[in-house]
Image: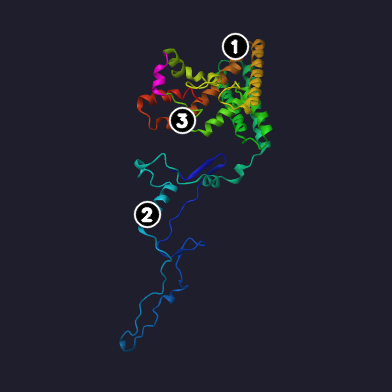
């Protein structure tokens, strides 16, 4: 088990646990063991009574050294248990006992250990720094679009789609941080920026934010996880061929994200746009309506641009980068859930579950 934490501020190891000494007491001020009542020089290691060499015979010999016994000697069982725990915390011995790993057992460290390993400045939310990322990314988005429209060359368009799709994904990540509250400590600022960013890439901010919260609250849960909802073999075999092809056969799942926002995952009902969906509670109705209106306004802007510049130009400038961005999203969720899907699932079921992950986000 890895003994370090990776954060955007760097990699910092978790504190190691060292085995206690079997004899004596370890000083906190030195890495060298020091025993109780030890003398400062070797002269004290002489015998209690000096050795007399009169008439060539040793007299009053006492060869016992003046050292103290440890305060407490741990039993063999306690030492073995502690050493085993140390090996797991420090990341050793994993391969030796991999067959005995229990995935349901709690980890040998606490959440507080992970938090303590992350530098303190990583927990500071600087709204000015966060907004600088927004300004930078939006400037790059408009700059790439202007350059591609000006050059209008088929050698340039594929490069533009890859770059702009990456930037659209960056806008999604910034909105994601707003939804988590990590963008700033101001909920209103998070909401305004989140709506602007997510609406610009046709994502209903509050609808997605709430369903994403459900994902984190039920991560890895086969039934309740919003991002990973595998089908049972019975439901999968009951689907008609057209549904199977559209949902599970490439390249169709790569176009599925907008459909997920509208109708969620197979086997679930509701919509990210419907305030009455079972995704939301009544107190969230106003937020969902606000996000749906913002999404509608952006859709209207795109329709107007389609009439102004033509649908083909709009597809090249916006449509294909939008698709690239959410292919990124699908691939990330696929990699994120792959290990979960392959644990304890028989091979036939695993095959369509892994394919199914290309649809679920």
Residue at disc 3, secondary structure: helix
Which residue is rendered at x = 56% and y = 15% of the image?
154
Residue 80 badge? 2
**CB atoms of marks 3 and 1 within 8 Å:** no
The correct choice, above or below, for 114 with respect to 248 in the image is below
What is the span of residues highlighted in magenta in the rendered image?
232-240
Res 191 quadrant in image: top right
Q: Which tag, 2 or 3, sits closer to the chain's start?
A: 2
Q: Characterize the magenta stretch by its predominant secondary structure.
A: helix
**CB atoms of marks 2 and 3 within 8 Å:** no
Residue bearing mark 3:
337
Residue at disc 2, secondary structure: helix
Q: Which tag, 2 or 1, sits closer to the chain's start?
A: 2
Whole-angstrom CA distance, mark 3 to mark 1, is: 36 Å
Where is residue 223 shown, x and y percent of the image?
46, 28
Residue at the outermost front position: 282
Q: Which tag, 3 or 1, sits closer to the chain's start?
A: 1
Crowding at label 2, few (<14), some or many (≥20) Cα neighbours within 10 Å?
Answer: few
Where is residue 82 shown, x and y percent of the image?
41, 53
Crowding at label 3, few (<14), some or many (≥20) Cα neighbours within 10 Å?
Answer: some
Residue at disc 1, secondary structure: helix
Q: Is residue 277 magenta?
A: no
Crowding at label 1, few (<14), some or many (≥20) Cα neighbours within 10 Å?
Answer: few
Residue 104 badge? none
- Front disc: 3 or 1: 3
Residue 312 badge? 1
Where is residue 177 shown, x and y percent of the image?
60, 33
């Amino acid at each position: 088990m890895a003994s370090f934490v990776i954060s955007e501020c760097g990699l910092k190891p978790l504190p190691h646990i060292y085995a206690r000494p079997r004899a004596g007491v370890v000083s906190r001020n030195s890495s060298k063991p020091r025993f109780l009542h030890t003398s400062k020089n070797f002269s004290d290691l002489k015998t209690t009574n000096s050795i007399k060499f009169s008439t060539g015979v040793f007299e009053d010999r006492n060869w016992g050294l003046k050292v103290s016994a440890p305060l407490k000697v741990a039993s063999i069982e306690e030492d073995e248990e502690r050493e085993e725990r140390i090996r797991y915390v420090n990341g050793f011995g994993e391969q030796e006992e991999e067959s005995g790993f229990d995935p349901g057992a709690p980890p040998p460290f606490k959440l507080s250990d992970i938090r303590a390993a992350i530098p303190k400045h990583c927990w500071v939310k600087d709204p000015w720094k966060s907004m600088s990322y927004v300004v930078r990314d939006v400037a790059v988005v408009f700059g790439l679009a202007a350059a591609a429209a000006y050059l209008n060359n088929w050698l340039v368009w594929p490069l533009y789609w890859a770059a702009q799709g990456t930037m659209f994904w960056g806008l999604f990540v910034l909105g994601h941080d707003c939804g988590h509250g990590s963008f700033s400590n101001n909920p209103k600022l998070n909401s305004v920026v989140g709506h602007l960013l997510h609406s610009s890439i046709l994502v209903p901010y509050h609808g997605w934010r709430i369903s994403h919260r459900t994902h984190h609250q039920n991560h890895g849960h086969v039934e309740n996880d919003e991002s990973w909802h595998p089908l049972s073999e019975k439901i999968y075999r009951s689907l008609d061929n057209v549904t199977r092809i559209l949902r599970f056969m490439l390249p169709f799942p790569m176009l599925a994200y907008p459909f997920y926002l509208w109708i969620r995952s197979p086997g679930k009902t509701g919509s990210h746009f419907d305030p009455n969906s079972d995704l939301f509670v009544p107190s969230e109705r106003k937020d969902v309506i606000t996000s749906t209106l913002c999404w509608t306004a952006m859709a209207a802007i795109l329709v107007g641009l389609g009439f102004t510049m033509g649908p083909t130009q709009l597809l090249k400038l916006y449509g294909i980068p939008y698709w690239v961005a959410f292919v990124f999203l699908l691939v990330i969720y696929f990699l994120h859930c792959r290990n979960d899907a392959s644990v304890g699932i028989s091979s036939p079921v695993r095959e369509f579950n892994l394919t199914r992950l290309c649809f679920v986000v």
